[in-house]
Image (tube, helix red, strand yellow):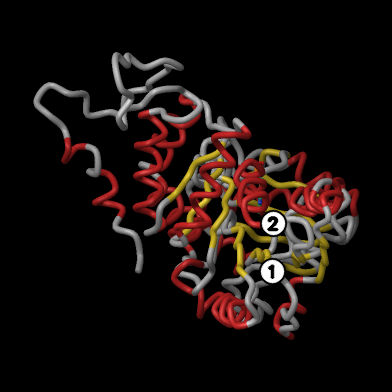
Amino acid sequence: MAPKTGEMLHLRGNTLDKGEPVALPLTQSSMFHLPGAPDGHDFYGRVNNPTWEHLEHVLAHLEDAPCLSFPSGMGAISAALFATVKVGTRILIPSDGYYVTRVLADRFLSHLGVSVTERPTTTFAEGGFDGFDVVFVESPSNPGLDMMDLPAIASAVRTAGGITIADNTTMTPLGQRPLDMGIDVVVASDTKAMGGHSDLLMGHVASRNVQILERVEEWRRVSGAIPGPHEAWLLHRGLETLDVRFDRMCSSAQVLAERLAGHAAIQSIRFPGLRNDPSYALAKAQTARFGFLLSITLDSEAKAEEFINSCPMLRPATSFGGVHSSAERRARWGDDVNPAFIRLSVGCEPVEELWQAIEASLNAL
Ligand SMILES: *Cc1c(COP(=O)(O)O)cnc(C)c1O
């Protein structure tokens, strides 16, 4: 069910006593006043913090599931993986998803006796999940924007006795709800659209599976991978405008994708909201919006660089999901894509202003 973002905005307000601040207070304290027995009170900053607790309340409202927040998306992904694997576990991850997740699996999990198998996103449709304890999915994939049939995968993996973890960073809970499709655990980088202002790193884990979430909480407490109260406060502030930002970004992405598809400088384009895109049918079935990420491939690496660096309304930067539109050539990080492939993250600029800048820069190439 779609999250009620109006209710989200009043979650705190409706619990206030007379004279309390309406805005969320930032609690920057490692110690809590604790005479006598601790009995359920906040007691130490690695374990409790009222600012994250309220942030998690808001995240839980968005995900319709209990949530734990982390100091980055990778902090959340590490927690979900370390909470679910042990020696002998077999995990399956996409070979074309977010690359640091693969590095974590290859450089750390595999050294601890976890067997890691990688497969391209599009082959997940063929099944073959028998023997895997953990299946990690990302849909749409970053940066290729290929999609997976999440309900089918969730049910096939469950039947085979495994659990599924979905990285939902690119869609946010407003765009796609993997838990409602049977996925066991959602992980996300809140550094991207959730925070939305390119001024923080954060992440979260959401799950309706109590045992898994308890392990994730224990991991956070003992590993010390806790969010800073200030970042938690900033993320909470960002979430208050997520609905309007996401709406603007997705609507603008649709307009831009349709116009870019007809522009002579574009060799190819991927956007799940274009009717002839390979992801269109799955996106239509599974997502509430088509997202704000699109990719275009130009004639050459040189033209791609010139476009990114000359367009006054595109920040040449890695990462995505901010209010400022941004773009980058993913091949510069070693992603297995055409050197002229550009990932474009559509921001909150008025769409006509954005299109005029993009069109003028493309025409000048
Ligand atoms: C950015 C990103 C991450 C990692 O998040 P950080 O906040 O940078 O640690 C994980 N998955 C996806 C899909 C991402 O885009």
Instruction: Report if the beta carbon of the residue with label 2 is closer than 8 angstroms to ligand 1.
Output: no
Q: Is mark 1 within 8 Å of ligand 1?
A: no
Crowding at dot 1, Cα within 10 Å, few <14 / some 14-19 / many 20+, comes out as many
Pick the residue in front: 78 or 334. Answer: 78
Residue 295 found in image quarter? bottom right
Q: Earlier in the sequence, mark 1 or mark 2?
A: 2
The residue indicated by pointer 2 is 85
Q: Residue at x 41, y 52 (%)?
A: 66
345 left or right, relative to 337: left
Q: Residues within 10 Å of mark 2 (few under 14, many from 20)?
A: some
Amino acid bearing label 1: Asp
Quadrant housing the N terminus: bottom left
- Seen from the viewer's position, the closer of residues 286 and 186 is 186
Q: Is residue 325 left or right of residue 208?
A: right
* Mark 1 and mark 2 residues within 8 Å of each other at the beta carbon: yes
Q: CA distance from mark 1 to mark 2?
A: 8 Å
Examine the image and state in which quarter residue 311 appears.
Answer: top right
Three-letter code for the amino acid on which mark 2 is drawn: Val
Residue 193 percent coordinates (x, y): 53, 47
* Residue 344 drawn at (x, y percent): 67, 53
Per the rendering, the mark at residue 70 is: none
Name the residue at 82% across, 44% down: 306
Q: Is residue 365 visible?
A: no
Residue 242: horizontal and vertical position, in percent? 42, 47
Whether residue 163 is visible: yes
Q: Which residue is mark 1?
A: 133
Q: Position of residue 7 (x, y in %)?
A: 24, 51
Q: Secondary structure at mark 2?
A: loop
